[in-house]
Image (tube, grey):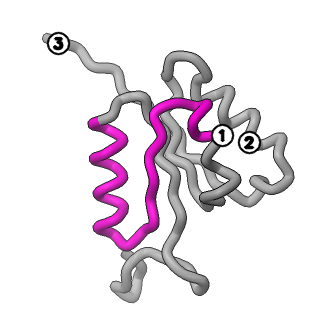
Amino acid sequence: MTKTGTKTGTKTGPLRILVVDDNRETASLITESLHDLGAEAEACLSGEEALARIAGFRPQILMLDLDMPGMDGFEVAQTLRARPDMGAARIIAQTAYGDAD
């Protein structure tokens, strides 16, 4: 929510947010919450999938899990920063470690 109480967005429409997390439940929960706040959000389950989806979706924000198998979040961020078309995108790094105890 913004200070005026309107839903999240820009002058050209809702924020486009790409959620990248190898945990399907986490990615789904975050994406649904972002939709509820008025964002246009999509989820990817791997770094490779995220890089493939970026050209078509053109996210303004990436919520990026740092600890993923294969291409981890650090590699995704480094690759994105090297792309001139993604220079304005913001990256929110996240990770979670669970303990069964």
Q: Are marks 1 and 2 in contact (CB under 8 Å)?
A: yes
In the image, taking residue 73 as reference, residue 81 lies left or right, namely: right
CA neighbours of label 2 inside 10 A, class few (<14), some (14 to 19), many (20+): some
Q: Amino acid at mark 2?
A: Leu
Residue located 70% across and 53% down the image: 55
* Mark 3, secondary structure of its residue: loop
Residue linked to disc 2: 80
Where does residue 7 sit, x and y in percent of width and height? 37, 79
* Mark 1, secondary structure of its residue: helix
N-terminal label among 1 and 3: 1
Would you place residue 77 above or below residue 74 in this image?
Answer: below
Q: CA distance from mark 3 to mark 2?
A: 34 Å
Residue located 86% across and 52% down the image: 84
Work out whether residue 101 or residue 7 is closer to the camera in this orientation and state it. Answer: 7
N-terminal label among 3 and 2: 2
Q: Amino acid at mark 1?
A: Leu
